[in-house]
Amino acid sequence: MDLVVPPGPGVPQGLTVPAADLVERFSRSSGPGGQGVNTADSRVELELDVEAFAGFTDTQRRRVLRALDPRLVGGRLLVVAASEHRQQRRNRVAARERMADLLRDAMAPPPAPRRATRPTRGSKERRLSAKRRRGETKAGRSRPAPDA
């Protein structure tokens, strides 16, 4: 079963990772399943070697390596685990969806840098007059000074 990354920013045509480039491992899950948890290997670990995968452009590979660096095992392997479902088949689908989301988000270009702006004169005046009005309101709540 191939991994399909839908189109998005940084992946205009989408991306398909062939099943041959993915490594799947199955183990016993600690999640739901009752007595079946002890016998069925329903937990799925999906692994992709990001550096060796030929489907990325150089830019996409750099973005993925930079964005997913904390998640990469050994600096090159992206591993995703899924064990939230009772059936292995559903966990396989969940792991592929999770990996596709990670890859799509990682390949997105970085946001444009923030351009520093200054408040306008009118906004400064409105802020200061509002502060003045608020101060006058609060000052009106105090007890009047005794006449001496």
Image (tube, rainbow, N blue to C red):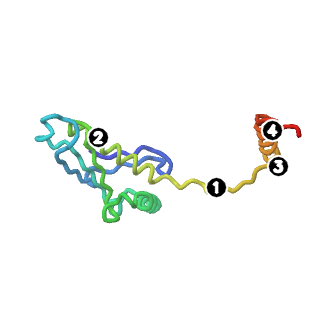
Q: Quadrant of residue 4?
A: top left
Residues packed near mark 3 inside 10 Å, few (<14), some (14 to 19) or many (20 plus): few
- State if disc 2 and disc 3 touch (CB < 8 Å): no
> Of the residues tagged 1 and 3, which is closer to the observer?
3
Seen at 48% across and 48% down, the residue is 12
Say whether disc 3 or disc 4 marks the residue closer to the N-terminus: 3
Q: Which mark is residue 121?
A: 3
N-terminal label among 2 and 1: 2
- Which residue corresponds to mark 2? 93
Report how far apart the C-alphas of labels 2 and 1 lie in the structure. Answer: 38 Å
Q: Earlier in the sequence, mark 1 or mark 3?
A: 1
Residue under circle 4? 136
Q: Say which residue label 1 marks.
A: 114
Residue 76 left/right relative to 128: left
Q: Farthest residue to the left: give it.
A: 39
Q: 41 or 118, which lies in front?
A: 118
Give residue 148's quadrant in the image: top right
The 10 Å Cα crowd at callout 1, few under 14, some 14 to 19, many 20 or more, is: few
Q: Secondary structure at mark 4?
A: helix
Labels 2 and 4 touching (C-beta < 8 A): no
Give the image location of residue 121, x and y in percent: 82, 49
Disc 2 residue type (three-letter): Val
